[in-house]
């Protein structure tokens, strides 16, 4: 089975070889730092060490195109699963959220979770992510509890601000809420916990492909346990795949297929994403750990925001009980704002209403106008007007003390 998979991929590579030996856009190989410099912005890398030995980096864009070092309000962007800090820059100069907010006077920081290549020469105190499968034994539980907490502390320490804005996208919001529920003292460190298309509550889910996959969770866990693997696919294969995708996605007729492929992951075809984003977007895709993947599948399947399910026996050892504990969302008390799109089938409105009901301090739920899907939050050129502007208004209102009451805005205009 495994051999035939490699075989078919190798065959595909050979068949397509003549298509992509020609010139490729070198920018598809840029790392986050190179991307930011190329786009003309200042960038700093700040190392982060977690309690459990992982070594990460934070990217900082301290100011925008016009140098201005005044005391800026701080925003930390938190990427989702299968994503990376790179994705907050792919829309390019002046438009990508990382740049847009820096140009508007914010001190922008980009979080980088374990498992993503954040340009650290060493990625763990003792483990090697190429050789040691155990490096990949994590899910959004650890990303929230260890990576985010340590990163927030570094941001606070370096900026001298004792509170920051956080903006999470998709599963990045699962990590944020895992942290806020598990270590409620972090609520005090956030001015507003801003959620773009949060995948936190999963009571309702209307996305057949993912529902189908969610039933395979137990099987994936069993197979990977037998093989002793913590990664979904071997690194060499992933590298080969991403490289093929990068090369193919830059040229017609593949460009369109890449775009469609990306859209399927984002649940629906976007009307706002430009086709030429696909070749850049695949650049930031990290390797995927089995636990990360199956935790998401369980989340969808069971409809509950719980810690990772290791199976009854190991749950007893790890949690002292048969089933993993639920995260208690009532402990996420930081002021919270939820931005969502009506046509985003990964964030059913009923789930967001449930968040709003359970969490004690939701100050805003904002429905982005028109057809706005899951990946539009980071890949749509129109997001500047449709999403980032209303977000900026919220930040300004907060900083100037204008936000006091719980308000609910139904749509833009
Ligand atoms: C904060 O910075 C100080 C000095 O720059 C350092 O001693 C301290 O360990 C830092 N704390 C954290 C949590 O990074
Ligand atoms: C920057 O502003 C924050 C609040 O907005 C304040 O707490 C901090 O002390 C200021 N830092 C400097 C160096 O002025
Ligand atoms: C996986 O293994 C567990 C226990 O070892 C078993 O209960 C479960 O049915 C298995 N699941 C599948 C899909 O094979
Ligand atoms: C969740 O936290 C709240 C506030 O501390 C508490 O009253 C409630 O009992 C907790 N719920 C669970 C299920 O632990
Ligand atoms: C998106 O932006 C394009 C170009 O700026 C514009 O023509 C189009 O009307 C916008 N779409 C929406 C839904 O705002």
Image (cartoon, rainbow, N blue to C red):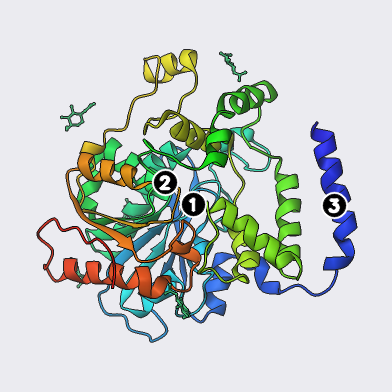
- Name the quadrant containing residue 220: top right
Residue holding disc 2: 147
Residue at 40%, 32% in the rendered image: 303
Residue at 46%, 58% in the rendered image: 373
Residue holding disc 3: 12
Q: Measured along the vertical axis of the image, is residue 17 above or below residue 329?
A: below
Front residue of 307/56: it is: 307
Q: Distance between the residues labelled 2 and 1?
A: 8 Å
Residue holding disc 1: 56
- Name the quadrant containing residue 234: top right
Element at badge 2?
Answer: helix
**Circle 1: is it few (<14), some (14-19), or many (20+) Cα within 10 Å?**
many
Q: Which mark is residue 336?
A: none
Front residue of 71/373: it is: 373
**Circle 2: is it few (<14), some (14-19), or many (20+) Cα within 10 Å?**
many
Residue 271: give x, y in percent of width and height: 52, 67
- Name the quadrant containing residue 191: bottom left
Q: Measured along the vertical axis of the image, is residue 406 above or below residue 204?
A: below
């Amino acid at each position: 089975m495994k051999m035939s998979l490699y075989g078919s991929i190798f065959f595909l590579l050979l068949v397509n070889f003549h298509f992509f030996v020609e010139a490729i856009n070198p920018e598809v190989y840029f790392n986050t730092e190179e991307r930011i410099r190329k786009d003309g912005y200042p960038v700093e890398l700040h190392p982060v060490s977690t309690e459990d030995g992982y070594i990460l980096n934070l990217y900082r864009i301290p100011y925008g195109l016009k140098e201005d070092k005044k005391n800026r309000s701080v925003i930390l962007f938190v990427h989702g699963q299968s994503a990376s800090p790179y994705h907050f820059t792919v829309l390019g100069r002046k438009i990508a959220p990382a740049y847009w907010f820096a140009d508007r006077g914010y001190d922008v920081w980009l979080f980088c979770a374990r498992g993503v290549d954040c340009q650290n020469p060493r990625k763990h105190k003792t483990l090697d992510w190429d050789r040691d499968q155990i490096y990949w034994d994590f899910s959004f539980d650890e990303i929230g509890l260890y990576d985010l907490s340590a990163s927030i502390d570094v941001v606070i320490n370096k900026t001298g601000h004792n509170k920051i804005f956080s903006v999470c996208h998709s599963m990045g919001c699962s990590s944020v809420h895992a942290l806020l529920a598990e270590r409620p003292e972090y609520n005090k460190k956030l001015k507003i916990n801003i959620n773009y298309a949060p995948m936190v509550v999963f009571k309702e889910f209307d996305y057949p492909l993912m529902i189908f996959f969610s039933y395979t969770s137990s099987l994936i866990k069993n197979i990977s346990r037998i093989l002793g693997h913590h990664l979904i696919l071997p690194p060499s294969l992933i590298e080969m795949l991403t490289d093929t995708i990068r090369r193919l996605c830059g040229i017609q007729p593949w460009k369109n297929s890449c775009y469609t492929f990306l859209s399927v992951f984002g649940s629906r075809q976007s009307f706002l994403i430009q086709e030429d984003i696909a070749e850049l977007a695949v650049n930031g895709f990290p390797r995927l750990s089995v636990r990360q993947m199956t935790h998401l599948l369980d989340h969808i399947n069971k409809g509950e925001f719980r810690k990772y399910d290791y199976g009854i026996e190991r749950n007893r050892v790890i949690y002292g009980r048969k089933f993993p504990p639920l995260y208690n969302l009532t402990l996420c008390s930081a002021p919270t704002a939820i931005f969502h799109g009506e046509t985003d089938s990964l964030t059913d409105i009923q789930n967001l209403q449930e968040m709003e009901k359970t969490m004690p301090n939701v100050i805003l739920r904002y429905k982005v106008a028109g057809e706005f899907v899951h990946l539009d939050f980071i890949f749509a050129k129109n997001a500047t007007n449709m999403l980032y502007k209303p977000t900026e208004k919220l930040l300004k209102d907060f900083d100037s003390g204008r936000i006091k009451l719980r308000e609910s805005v139904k749509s833009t205009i």
